[in-house]
Image (cartoon, rainbow, N blue to C red):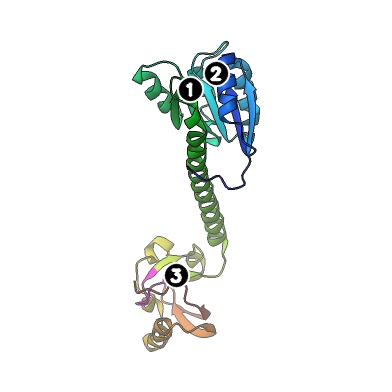
């Protein structure tokens, strides 16, 4: 049996058969289950359209008055990822279950099956959906962080760059254009030493990169795209430990 810990599980049962409502209610009669019942397809759609974030699992019958189970899922296609759907059907056709899964159901429960197994199946798809949702949220957070970083990176006025231990430039801010006259895509992939007036100075800096030392306000002379010497102050810290 899957473990639910102390989580309160909010379940919406969309079912019009009084007999099935009774059997399912009995099967899910646990302290950690908050069961809401809607018997009409249209009412269920309207409820889920506005409250889809307040439901963990939807037990959705196939044949319903107003809208059937398929129609409900089709109309909620942009919100169905917010909750797990367990499709209920008395239909013995495999195609029915397959179509339900295509529309977003995570699993199906044949009504001729023993309802004693329903609780375990509900908890199982809830936990599986929670892991999927957690991964989705994490992915969205990472994308958001990357966008924020990119915006900050693009707006930096000083030259900020990332280099490998060998001194190869793997990323550089667009400000390199206004300061040194080079396009950032022209510079990426090249060796930083190319832009140093004194290559011996770069070799000292490179040894510090390899050893993991930090530099602050280190005075250097760079050469811009026109061959003009540009005096700069360099800060250096290691953000990656493995050799590139």
Q: Distance between the Cα atoms at labels 1 and 2?
A: 10 Å
Which element carries disc 3, helix, strand or loop? strand
Residue 57 location, quadrant: top right
Q: Position of residue 228 (x, y in %)?
A: 45, 77
Residue 162 image label: 3
Q: Is residue 128 above or below residue 201?
A: above
Callouts 2 and 3 close, C-beta under 8 Å: no
In this figure, which residue is indicated by the disc labeled 2? 20
In this figure, which residue is indicated by the disc labeled 1? 88
Q: Is residue 98 above or below residue 157?
A: above
Front-most of residues 104 and 226? 104
Q: Residue at x 63, y 23 (%)?
A: 37
- Magenta region: 163-169
Residue 17 image label: none
Callouts 1 and 2 close, C-beta under 8 Å: yes
Q: Distance between the Cα atoms at labels 3 and 1?
A: 55 Å
Which element carries disc 2, helix, strand or loop? helix
Q: Residue at x 41, y 27 (%)?
A: 101
């Amino acid at each position: 049996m899957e473990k639910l810990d102390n989580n309160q599980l909010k379940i919406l049962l969309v079912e019009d058969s009084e007999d099935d409502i009774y059997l399912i209610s009995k099967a899910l009669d646990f302290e950690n289950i908050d069961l809401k019942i809607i018997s009409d397809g249209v009412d269920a759609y309207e409820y889920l359209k506005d409250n889809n974030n307040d439901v963990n699992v939807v037990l959705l019958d196939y044949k319903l008055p107003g809208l059937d189970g398929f129609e409900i899922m089709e109309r909620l296609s942009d919100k169905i990822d917010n909750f797990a759907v367990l499709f209920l059907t008395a239909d013995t056709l495999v195609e029915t279950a397959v179509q339900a899964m295509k529309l977003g159901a995570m699993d199906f429960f044949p009504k001729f099956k023993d309802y004693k197994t329903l609780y375990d199946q509900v908890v199982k798809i809830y936990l599986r959906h929670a892991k999927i949702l957690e991964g989705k949220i994490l992915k969205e957070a990472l994308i958001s962080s990357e966008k924020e970083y990119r915006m900050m990176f693009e707006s930096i006025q000083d030259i900020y760059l990332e280099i490998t231990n060998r001194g190869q430039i793997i990323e550089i801010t667009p400000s390199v254009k206004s300061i040194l006259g080079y396009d950032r895509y022209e510079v990426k992939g090249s060796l930083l030493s190319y832009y140093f007036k004194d290559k011996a100075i770069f070799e000292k800096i490179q040894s510090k990169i390899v050893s993991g030392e930090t530099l602050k306000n280190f005075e250097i002379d760079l050469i811009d795209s026109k061959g003009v010497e540009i005096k700069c102050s360099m800060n250096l810290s290691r953000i990656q430990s493995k050799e590139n």
